[in-house]
Each structure stands twice: as C-alpha cells, then as structure tokens.
Image (tube, coloured by chain):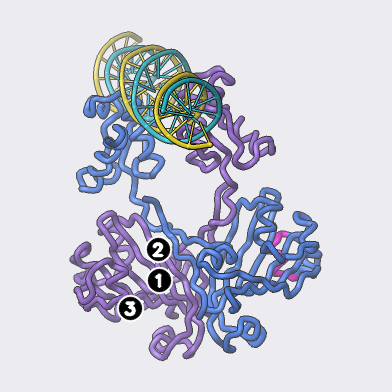
Chain colours: A purple, B blue, C cyan, D yellow
Amino acid sequence: MAAKFIDIKQHLVAQIEQGHWPEHHRVPSENRLAAQFNCSRMTARRALTELVEQGVLVRSQGRGTFVAQLKSQGSMLNIRNIADEVRERGHQHQMELLRLEVVAANTEVAIALGIKEGESVGFSSLLHFEEALPVQLEHRYVNLQLVPDYLQQTFERHTPHEYLSQQAPLTEAHHEVEAIAADDALAAQLQIAQGAPCLRIVRRTWSRSGTVSFARLTHPGSRYRLGGHLIMEK
Amino acid sequence: MAAKFIDIKQHLVAQIEQGHWPEHHRVPSENRLAAQFNCSRMTARRALTELVEQGVLVRSQGRGTFVAQLKSQGSMLNIRNIADEVRERGHQHQMELLRLEVVAANTEVAIALGIKEGESVGFSSLLHFEEALPVQLEHRYVNLQLVPDYLQQTFERHTPHEYLSQQAPLTEAHHEVEAIAADDALAAQLQIAQGAPCLRIVRRTWSRSGTVSFARLTHPGSRYRLGGHLIMEK
DNA sequence: ACAAACAACTTGTATATACAAGATGGTAAA
DNA sequence: TTTACCATCTTGTATATACAAGTTGTTTGT
C-alpha cells in the first residue's frame, strides 16, 4: 500500500494533468486537503511541499498554493569534461602541456576571477588529443589564493579540471559558447585551416570559497559537437 | 533570527566543508541531532531531509545518514527562446517568414522525428532579427500528426517555438551545438561573409505523445553567444 | 558451528497541537 | 473618503508522540 501523502500527490497531479486545474489555479489549502483525505494537516502539507519542490505547484505564505506555470523553455545542455568525453567514445585521450606559469591578470581575467588587475594568477595551456587529432585547446587561469599548488602539477594523468574538482569542490559554473574563426596560432595548434570555424566555450567555476578558475576551451568545429543532452523535467 | 532547522543544516554543511566529515562519513542520527540542538526529532529530521534533497547527504532506512559523494561534473547550460532572449536585452525582435510548406522527410528528418522516410512533414524557415540585424536562421521540421495545424499559422506574433509549446507541452528536448562555416546561401541570409563562423544548434523536442519537431538554429558567430547560465546547485 | 530469535538502533510515516507570520477583506473610527 | 484596526484565512516553524520498517550485532538454543 502506498503512503498516504503519495495518494494526495497523485490526486493533485491528476487534477492538473486532466485539465481540471489550469495554470495559476488555486489548489485546496492544507486544512481542506486534510479534511478531504481524512488525514492530518502535516500529511497534506507534505504532499504540497513535495510538489512545490518538483515545480508542480507554487505557494506563498498567507495567499495559498497554486498550480505552477508549465516550464516551457529553460532547457539545459550538458557540458562535460573533454577527457571523459573522449574516453566514452572509446578513443584514446592524450594531453600535451604547452605552458604552465604565473602571469599577471589582465582586466578580463581579473574580473572573471574576482581579483585585482595585475595580481598573480596561474596560467596553463594544454592541447587535448582524441587519438592523434587535437580536439581542444585549453587556456586556463586559476586563482592561486584558492589553489596555491596549481603550478606544481604535471597534468600527465589528470586534467586541470579533474585536479581542480578534487581540490576545491565546484559548486557552480558559468558557460558561454561562441563560434569563432581560427587565427594563425589557433589554426596551427588545432591543425586546421586558418579561418576555419571553431567552437569556443568560456567557463568560469566557483567553489564555496570563491571563483576558482576561468577557462577558454576551443574546439575545431569540424571535429567537435557540443553536448546533446536531455532537458526540462519528466 | 534564522529558523532552527537552518542552523542545523548550516552546522552539518560546515562540518563537511571544513573537512571534519569526509565522503561517506556517517552523520549523527536524527535523535542525536535533536538532543544536540535541543530540538524535536522532526526538526532535526527536516534539516537532514533537505540536505538529502540537495544531494549533500544520502540516507538509508535502518543504516543511517551519510555524507554524499561530491557531484563533480554534470554542468548545465541554458538554451533559450531567441525571441525572449532578444527582448530581454531590451532590443526589438522581428521575424521574417521565408518558407512554410509540406515537404517529404529525408533520412535525417525521418529519424529525428521518428517517422518513415518520404512521409509529409511541415517545414518552416524563418529569419529572426535583433533590431535590424539577422541573429538566427531557423529551419524547422514539424511532425504533422501531432501538430496538424502547423502550416496554417502565420508566425507574425508568435514564434514557432512559442506556438508548439502551447499546442503540445514539451516534456523533453535534445540539443547539439556545433561551429560551422557559412556557405553562400547562409552568408547571404545572415548578412555575413562567406566562410564566417556560425553557431548552429540542432534541437529536437518531445511532448508526451511523441517527437514534435526538429530544428536547426543557425547564428552568426560574430553576433551571438550562446547561453551563459548557472549550474549544479547552490 | 550454525541458525533462529531478539534487542537496539536507524529512518519512514502519520497524527495532534501550538504559535508565528503574511495576506485579505471587512468594519469601525477619523 | 480615507485610515486604522481586526478577524480570518493562508502557509511556516516547531514540538511531542506513536508505530512501522529496515539494518546490525548479540544472544540463545539446537
């Protein structure tokens, strides 16, 4: 036998799905539901609370509980660790460490990392290979106050992303994706033609203690498709 | 003054963040927490339950409650309706309907929509403008069995995406993003140079009854950045 | 040595109750 | 008419209690 609060949830969802309760419709109060289902208010409350967490209902103190708007847009796309991605395709992943040094933060980096311009930040530049072909050029700026040992890493076994995830658990990230044309340097490194389209992902990651790193991940457009992942809710 | 269950949550999170409790560490039971914080078991329980929902803890009946594994990757990027996006920037959004007709599904479209090759599908082609500049060329194939009136629309006020969302509430979507070079036709329509990099999003959307539509959304790389949205959880 | 039973602990569900706090509408006073 | 107050409804927080049900280790009986 299912728990009582589940019965109530199902009843509420049924009303919405069958169209009896449109968006913004006011649903019965906790006390009404308790009377209706012959249960205590706390049990009715649990049903409502869980549906609020699921985004089915919205509620506000003093006013009542209402059917939520259908979440229409707001789709999500999965962005992954390139090494995992390559390995998941059954291919070999390799990295080549190009640079690993201290640099002074320019304006863009300073803003992204939330530090002062000119301060020291860790910089790494890596080329990721899928089998023998370059698939990603990774330029990364790291907040050395939060990750002081970043420059002592070798990045032979683990990617910077893997190392950082381990050091300072990431709590949030921000991505932007753009299409750019390869300039001379980029074309040479990615082994593509000058002017060829590239997919660039700009990623900022936070941990609880602050902004950890700021990375530019550049992929040859011809060899890389981003993401493809599911969305919305059930 | 903060609520009591919040104090308990903060205390628990603090232990984890400060490294006192590693992954899989067993946290105090509901009764122990209740004694420790001089509150009822249900209040301690609420703190634990909410942290379970947030993925900070895991618990199992009879055994106890434990610190969860850190959720490492799995970041998400927001993909939006272009019209909303433009309006949100405070700019004017306009559309130009280029084509709206029945076509026979080729192999790619048939697979994407889950129908037979050669079957009739709705096809629309629209150009979206931000102020006076093209920002998106939308090519869309629609499953006419699910949305029979698609071709009777005018798409003057509402975008195809808005119309479809209204007709058949979307339950899921799948996206892929790639960088491509503009060919002659694309360059002309988007008013960019031939060979210029473009960001292309391939989107499939489902409703409960099946695959609704398959769209190719192509943006000039110079005028468009995708998404930029937050991730993981707080 | 083995298995069954049990005790002790855990989380899960449910009830009854109390008061706090936000929202709303009506009523009475200015 | 406008303002102030109040009753009443809502959700939010908290407590005390009870029993169900899963897990684990110990004890007991064979």
Q: Marks 1 and 3, Cα distance to the nearest angstrom?
A: 20 Å
Instruction: Please report the residue visible at 77 percent of the width from the left and 64 percent of the height from the top.
Output: B121
Chain of the residue where label 3 is placed in the rendered structure: A
Q: Name the residue beneath numbered marker 3.
A: A96
Disc 1 and disc 3 in contact, CB within 8 angstroms: no
| Quarter in which the N terminus of chain B is drawn | top left
- The label on residue A202 is 1
N-term mark: 2 or 1: 2
Q: Residue at x 66, y 52 (%)?
A: B207
Vertical side of A131 occupied by B112: above or below: above
Mark earlier in primary sequence (1, 3)? 3
Amino acid at dot 2: His
Q: What amino acid is labelled 1 in the image?
A: Val
Among numbered discs 3 and 2, the one appearing first in the sequence: 3
The magenta region covers B106-114
Callout 3: SS: strand
